[in-house]
Structure formats: C-alpha cells, structure tokens
Image (cartoon, coloured by chain):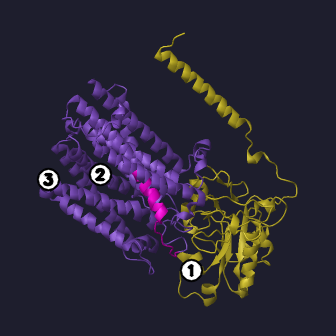
Amino acid sequence: MLDKALIGSRRYWIWIIILLALIGIGFINYLRQFNYGLGITGMSRDVSWGFYISQFTFLVGVAASAVMLVIPYYLHNYKKFSKIVILGEFLAVAAVTMCLLFIFVDMGQPMRILNVILHPTPNSILFWDALVLNGYLFLNIVIGWATLHAERKGIPPASWLKPLIYISIPWAISIHTVTAFLYAGLPGRHFWLTAIMAARFLASAFASGPALLLIVALLVRKYTKFDPGREPIQTVGKIVTYAMIVNVFFFLLELFTAFYSKVPGHMHSFEYLFAGYEGYGKLVPLMWISIILAIISLILLINPNTRRNETTLVLGALAVFFSLWIDKGFGLVIGGFIPNPFETVTEYWPTLPETLITIGVWAIGFLILTVLYKVVVSVREELGDVEVEH
Amino acid sequence: MSLNRREFLKITGLIGLGIGVSGVNLLLRGRVDASEFLSSPESLVAERWAMVVDVNKFKTEEDYRRIIDACHSIHNVPDFGNKKDEVKWIWTDEFEHAFPEQQNRYLPEWVREKPFPLLCNHCDNPPCVRVCPTKATFKRKDGIVAQDPHRCIGCRFCMAACPYGSRSFNWRDPGPFIKERNPDFPTRSIGVVEKCTFCVERLAKGLEPACVEKSNGGLVFGDLADPNSNVRRLLSTHYTIRRKPELGTQPSVFYIIGGEENA
C-alpha cells in the first residue's frame, strides 16, 4: 500500500519537497551539534533540559490522544468515527516517532543509546518510558496498517487485531502517565513534584491532540476529496472542549495550592513564568499568550454557536493547540528548572541551531503523517468512497 | 529446491534467532563486573564514607581556593570561563543559596556572608542513582555515589533529579579547557555528566580526598558507621546541619554551624 504515497499531485510533491528541505536543514544542524556538543543549544548547567525534551513531552500527549477516537469507536460502537479513527492512529505514529527522535537529539552520547536496553534499569522511569513509547508505536503501526489493509480488501479486520486495539487503550494512558512520572517523582523540583501532574498531562493531551487532529482532518478534506463528515468533526470538537475545560481546571488547582499555602518553592516557578522572578521574566510574554489563547479557545468552544460553525471551531482548535504547545512545549519543562536548586535564576532560550533541529524533527513527523494519510486517502479513493482526483 | 513463503519465513526466522543468540553470547562472554576486582591492601575502606565541613576553619579566600584547585586540577575539571558550560566538582556559595529553606534575614552577618563549600552529598537515597536509565551512576557499598562516564548516555535525568545542583554536563569538548592535564586521571568526553566522587581513586591508594588533604582541618573525612571515627566525634560534639534534609535523601556531607566559641 505504501506505493500509493509515490503517486501524487504536484501540490503533494511540493509539500513533500518542502518537508524534505526542512529535514535536511535540521539534519545538517544536528551534525553540527553532534560535533560541537549540546553546548550549541541554549541549555546550561542550571536549565539542563530545553526545547527538545519539552517538545517530546508535548508530543507524547498528541500521541496518546488517539485513544479519544479509539474509545468511542471500538468501545462505544460510535460508527461515525469509522472514517477518522485511522487518522488518529496514524497521527499517533507520527507523534511517537517525533517523541523518540526528540529524545535521541537530546542525548549527549547518542551512539550509546542502546545502553538503555543493554543495562535495563527498572528503577529509572526513562527505561519504562522507552518501553511504553516503542510499544505504543508498534501497536499503532500494526493496528492502523492492518485495519486499512482489510478495508482495502473489503474484508473485516483480522480477529487478532481486537486484543491489540483493547490493549492500545490503557497503553495510550500509560505513555503519558509514565512521561509525567519522569517529572513528578523528582525531589527538590517543586514545580513538577505534584500528584496531579499525570492527570494534568492527560487532560492537556486530550485537548491538544484531538485539536490537531481536527485541524489536520479539515486540511485533508480541503486538499483531497476525502470527507471525514461533519458530525465526527463536531464530536471531536466537543472532546477538545471538555478536555480543555478540565485542563484549565487542573491548572487552577495548581495555582490554588501554590498561592494559598504560600510555600515559597511552590510559588517560585509560577511567579517566574507568569510575572517574573527576581527581575527575570523572559518567558512571561509567551506564557500570557498561552493564557489569552486558552481563554479565547474556551469562549469559542463552549459557546455552541461558535463551536458548530466550522470556521470558528477551527480557530478554537488552533487556539487550544498553540496555547497548550506553549504551556507544555515550553513553560512546563523550562519552568521546572527556574529557579535552580540554589534559588537563583539562569534563563533559557533556544538557539538557532536548536530551533532548526526542532523544526527538522517536526518536519519528519509531518512527512510520516503526510505519507500515511496519503495512503489512507488513496485507498479510499480506490474503493470509491470518495471521488478520484489526480 | 523451491521454497514456499512459509518455509522461507521459517528458515530466515531460525537463522535470525541463531545470529541473535550467538551475538548475545559474544557480548556477554568477555564481561567482567567492576565488583569482581578486589581492593588493594593499602586502600582506605569504610562502611559509610562521610564528610564534615567546618566552615570556621576557612578564614581567607585562599583557604577555599586551595581545596577547589586541588580537586579540579587532579581530576582534569575544565574551566570554560562561562556559566553556561560550567563544570565543577566543588565550589562555594552563600548560606541562603546552600540552605535556601533556612532563610532568615536576621542571621549573623558572618553566617550570611560566609562562603560554604558545596559538593556532591553522596546521599544514602540518591535520586540521581534512582533515575539513571543505564546504571552509569551508582552507589557503592561504602556509600560513595560513583559513576561510569563510559556508560553515560548523556540524558541528564540525574541533573534534573539532583536537588543540590551537584552535577555538571560536558556541553562541549572539555579537552582544550583543561589547564594542565593530569595523566593519572581520565578526562571526560563530550556529552557525559560528571561530579565529585569523594576521590575514589585516591582512597584506593590509601589517600584521603584531595580537598580534605588541602583543607587544614576544615574538611574532615571518615567512616560514619564507626562510632570512634573522627567524623562521628565531630558530629557528637557540634551542632551540624545538612542540605535539604526534608527531601529524605540523607546527605552524608555535614556542616558545622556556630561561631569560634563552639568549635
């Protein structure tokens, strides 16, 4: 079926070439990083994780969110998701691949990465994260590919797929829980040391992932003749709405605990991110953009009129996605390192090579997504589900 | 002979398995665990190594300089001259940064302004060891938190986990930034984490840690498990504090606080 990705319109190939160019630029910069060391990034002794690990954290959420389509379709027999559930699974494939690549580019000694398997260490959460992420990638490739294959042949999916699909549901929850545990179990990092971390991660994942899916599905509809249908899009919109409300609620819970208890360590990172701490506030404007986008998204999504209107629905989804990208793809990881264990501040901002490597990894993700979605659309065109356009 | 698909898959599967098994066998055959090496008779041994820092014994800037230089020069610690790339094993900071949970604006001036030597605490419950995905950092039987820079993958999870900011990462090649190379101690490569090791290499030769040797009694090193050791004697006669004890890491570096009259 992969051959379907080799036949496409002019626009398809231009898009592929743009992605390949971005990947190439990212790769050249990765080689520079490989030679010079991670000092080429904005990271430092005090802020020892930066853009890469925060993108990884954000994308684990996007990957996990496929379950928001799998649960209604496979557990509740919500047939209207039949056309888009595979979009969720393939989005997960692209997102998990990006996660693994972001971990890889963050390694100081990437050639030794297999030491994680050669010296398995169950007390390290990173060991479990590597396991669950690779497992989730495998599950989604197999499930997505096999169901599409069956659809193409016009036969029901193989019976052995059912257990895999059911396993993939708790597995999706596990990838984001384990990722939250990377942070939530570290003594002395007050910003992360919170029992609600995994729950907050899942809430933001189930908002940002389906929001991205909604945007991408409508893009697919715009540029191909594949139509996911109006009602599934509306349902995804509702999922995003509920998850975003829960996410904002969890965030407010964090604020209450920090600022009512007035325990300094609990307040410091919030102060740094949203108001500035001891005169440092590089991230303050960005974090406020995140808050404003969150408010805009809630207004657009909660109001039934704007949610039903597809233009404002997409705007709401975009606002959710970028709000949470800033919150989790930036603030959460960086904020945890500021102030440092000595309660002094070293600020962080990504450098140009670091940014280009990050864009390169995203481009790889979008390339995988494009190829997989192209296969899906082509298979369905062949089946006559949609009109053929070449 | 013609093979059908099923037979072909069976045979390739079996061959693959065979290669895998022999590969694992090859990898494991030469394997020797560090613990299989016996310590030499002259080495200093203890059940639980610990350090007591008596800041009262540090009078001048030179007193601090001497211990830091001793450590950094023999361990080939690079000096990048900037904070971003900084690598350090032992350094000083003010009381409010070393003990942030003990902030008290009415502390005597000499406490507020005195530099405190800081280093790895060699915790009983080291979070860095807990999080390391490759066992590159590990706790020895004598309590020292050591590490194998050749196994480190540079994920920096230990840096996020250490509540004491004791760990440094080689953001760049340290080679050109080592002032004078000590050929008896390995240099580190790009992309690995490092920190104080309580001078395991010197203990093995029967020597005290380098900083202790140069401290004129300001740093005292000994066996915490031995009630008659020098560290235990100091701990039983002085009021000492540890960094962030509320985290339950059980640091084994103790600080004597108190004026000359208590010393």
The residue closer to the viewer here, A210 or B242, is A210
Q: Earlier in the sequence, mark 2 or mark 3?
A: 2
Q: Is residue B91 magenta?
A: no
The residue closer to the viewer here, A317 or A18, is A18
- SS at badge 3: helix
Count all numbered tags in the image, as a single digit: 3
Disc 3 residue crowd, few under 14, some 14–19, many 20+, Cα 10 Å: some
Asked whether the beta carbons under mark 2 and mark 1 sit within 8 Å of each other, the answer is no
Residue stretch in magenta: A343-363
Disc 2 residue crowd, few under 14, some 14–19, many 20+, Cα 10 Å: many
Residue at horizontal 44 percent and vertical 73 percent from the top? A268
Q: In this figure, which residue is indicated by the disc labeled 3?
A: A308
Does A253 sit left or right of B68 as displayed?
left
Residue at horizontal 54 percent and vertical 23 percent from the top? B13
Asked whether the beta carbons under mark 2 and mark 3 sit within 8 Å of each other, the answer is no
Q: Quadrant of residue B156?
A: bottom right
- Give the CA separation, mark 2 to mark 3: 17 Å
The shade of chain B is yellow
Amino acid identity at mark 3: Arg
Have a look at marks 2 and 1 and say if they share a chain: no
Is residue A60 shown to the viewer in this render? no
Please report, as a chain letter, where disc 2 is located. Answer: A
- Give the CA separation, mark 3 to mark 1: 56 Å
Q: In this figure, which residue is indicated by the disc labeled 1?
A: B96
Q: In this figure, which residue is indicated by the disc labeled 2?
A: A212
Q: Is residue A154 above or below residue A194?
A: above
